[in-house]
Amino acid sequence: MTPQAWRSWPSREALSREGRSVARTRLSRGVRLLALGTLLWSTFSQRHVAGWAAVAAVAGVLLTGFLVWSFYHTTLRNDLWPSVGTLVVLMGGAVVARHGGFEIPATVLWCGCAVVAMERLPLVAALPTTLLALGGFAAYNQDSWLTTTITTAGLLLAGYVLRLDAEARGNAQRLLAQERAALAAEAESAALVERARIARDIHDVLAHSLSAQLVHLEAARLRIEREPHSPFRDQILERVVAARSMAREGLAETRQALSALRGDMPPLGDYLRELAAMDGAEVEIGGEPRPLPAEASQTVRRVVQEALTNVRKHAPGARVLIRLTYGADEVTLDVRDSGGNGAAPAGLGASGSGYGLLGMRERAELLGGTLEAGPGGPEDPGEKGFTVRLRVPA
């Protein structure tokens, strides 16, 4: 065994109760309760324990429990001298208990100190401490020397076996944690590869298609503008310009979706300002901005897009305020319009699938959030306009 091994503490996994099976935990708890019951029974079953002696005995049992708890935590922090000092105090208490006529509590303390020292301390400190505890036990034990020798050797061996068992459990815990981390990294890598493949497919199909549409619509616009003015020509030009605008927005949203898939989305505040500039909306940011999880950020972006689309459909010309508030453990998005000042183009209000609000609400609920939508504002539903409020944990 190397010198480093003699000075090393058992691993934290070995010293803690993490990773113990239910049966092992119950067995350990049962052993502790049995030891405590033995101490209490042996202390208070003696006839001379009465009056102040009983008070002193109760105080001794409580102090012993506190010192055992302290030893567990100091070893968990790898504090050597406080741990050894706690055991020395317990062994001193065993000597006092033995001279006071409490033979069984003294024996339990000496044996317990010997076992836990071997189990939880570095070997360079565990061996002297264990031998000191076993020496105290042997010095006061009234059995034959053979019985005492066998008992002390058994206690020394039991402590070392418990140490090896705890180390084996700790190693198993570390290997399990490493395996879980490796599986998580592998799953994340596979997800990134799949997202990159989807992003390439979207770029090769949808983005190219929208780019081609923009080229053709721009060519059509230029061709129509060269025609003589007439009501029919102006109506066709208006529709072509609107189609070109929608294709440009679709291409921008496709690029944003590609950025989200590749994990390089722009900051949420910048995105909201850019989107608001296209629709003439106002943006307010409250709280301390911070990076959001990808799912929460994407949900906020999609809800803003859908809300602005609904404003264009149902309330053209309305003033729109987009307010994003960063809370302690959530973000709140409010998209509020002032009510339409004009009529929507024919058929535009009825366009779409009609599931926009439902889709936004489902996005929020998948993240454990909420979405409210209705006339006016949340504080005054009677006000003019329409408000969409999203709350998502982040």
Image: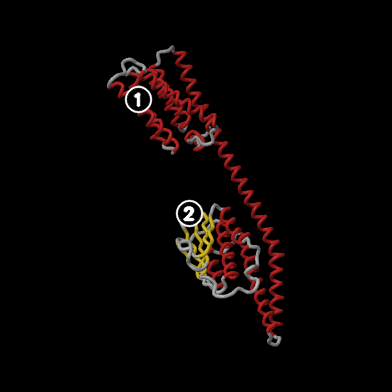
Alpha carbons under labels 2 and 1: distance apart: 51 Å
Among the two numbered marks 2 and 1 on one chain, the one whose residue lies closer to the N terminus: 1
- For mark 2, give the secondary structure: loop
Q: Amino acid at mark 2?
A: Asp
Q: Is residue 89 visible?
A: no
- Within 10 Å of disc 2 (Cα), the crowding (few <14, some 14-19, many 20+) is few
Label 1: element kind: helix
Q: The residue under label 1 is which amino acid type?
A: Gly
- Which residue: 64% across, 49% down? 187
Please state the total of marks drawn on the protein image.
2
- Residue annotated with mark 2: 329
Measuring 50% from the left and 58% from the top, which residue is drawn there? 331
From the image, tell me which residue sits under label 1.
Answer: 93
**140 or 26, which lies in front?**
26
Look at the picture and state if 172 lies above or below 112. Answer: below
Q: Residues within 10 Å of mark 1 (few under 14, many from 20)?
A: some
60 horizontally vs 72: left or right: left
When asked about the image quadrant of residue 176, the answer is top right
The picture places residue 41, in percent across and down from the top left corner, at 39, 19
Residue 330 seen from this side? yes
Give the label on residue 153, or none: none
The location of residue 64, given as percent across then percent down, is 37, 28
